[in-house]
Amino acid sequence: MTGTSLSNVTGRGVYVRGNDIDTDRIIPARFLKCVTFDELGPALFYDVRFDGDGNSTQHALDDAKHKGATILISDDNFGCGSSREHAPQAIQKFGFHAVIAGSFAEIFHGNCATLGIPCIVMQKSDRHRLGELINADPQTEVVIDIEAMKVSCADESFDMTMKDSAREAFLAGTYDPLDNLLASMDAVKATSERLGYAGRD
């Protein structure tokens, strides 16, 4: 028994340009005191979306034409900096289902995978072309085909890469470690009994 497999992600995209976008920019540290992760969504990229007085900076995420976008596109070394799981949580709670970038920080990538957020790598020229297609028609859909390893948009198709282990986990539905643990409870109980832990307080 495994979780739900994920072979493709479809949705409208928004390009947040910039290399080395770190986790503190994705979700500023002062928002980490939240009670539930659901509170993180509105704070995504807060310090670049709003000025010191709380006025909008007209960031791409707040552009009406990108409202409802579910695929985030960015550049190299996305998610670098501190290893805070709140960053992918904020991305997910804002409404994004996948991230496309030039490269990803290792821990950020792993935290995204366990939430079911594919981290897709595309070459710079292809990402820029994808951004052009989205700007020309923000309502056009971007399709990430994890099985075929292709990203398509407006009748154009681009090559993509992702970690083999992540791809296999998404296709098999084994990306969530908690799901894997719960699906293996019989084996866990058997091991507990064998080691003499059964019945202990």
Image (cartoon, rainbow, N blue to C red):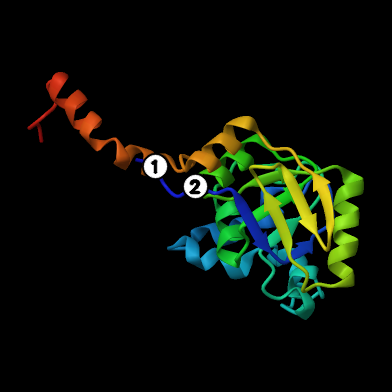
Tag 2 residue: 5
Residue depicted at x 66% and y 45%: 119
Residue furthest to the top in view is 195
Tag 1 residue: 2
Q: Position of residue 13 (x, y in %)?
A: 75, 64
Q: Tell which of 84 and 66 is nearer to you.
A: 66
The answer to whether 91 appears left or right of 143 in the picture is: left
Residue depicted at x 54% and y 47%: 85
Quadrant position of the N terminus in the picture: top left
Q: Quadrant of residue 73?
A: bottom right
Three-letter code for the amino acid on which mark 1 is drawn: Thr
Q: Quadrant of residue 165?
A: top right
The answer to whether 46 appears left or right of 29 in the picture is: right
Q: Is residue 29 above or below residue 64?
A: above
Q: Position of residue 86 (x, y in %)?
A: 55, 53
As measured in the structure, the alpha-carbon distance from the residue carrying label 2 to the one carrying label 1 is 8 Å
Query: For the residue labelled by badge 2, is the local secondary structure a helix, a strand or a loop?
Result: loop
Q: Position of residue 68 (x, y in %)?
A: 67, 73
Instruction: Examine the rendering and report whether any part of residue 8 can be seen.
Output: yes
Residue depicted at x 83% and y 63%: 154
Quadrant position of the C terminus in the picture: top left
- Within 10 Å of the Cα at label 1, are there few (<14), some (14-19), or many (20+) other Cα atoms? some
Three-letter code for the amino acid on which mark 2 is drawn: Ser
The answer to whether 31 appears left or right of 77 in the picture is: left
Q: Do the residues under discs 2 and 1 have CB atoms within 8 angstroms? A: yes
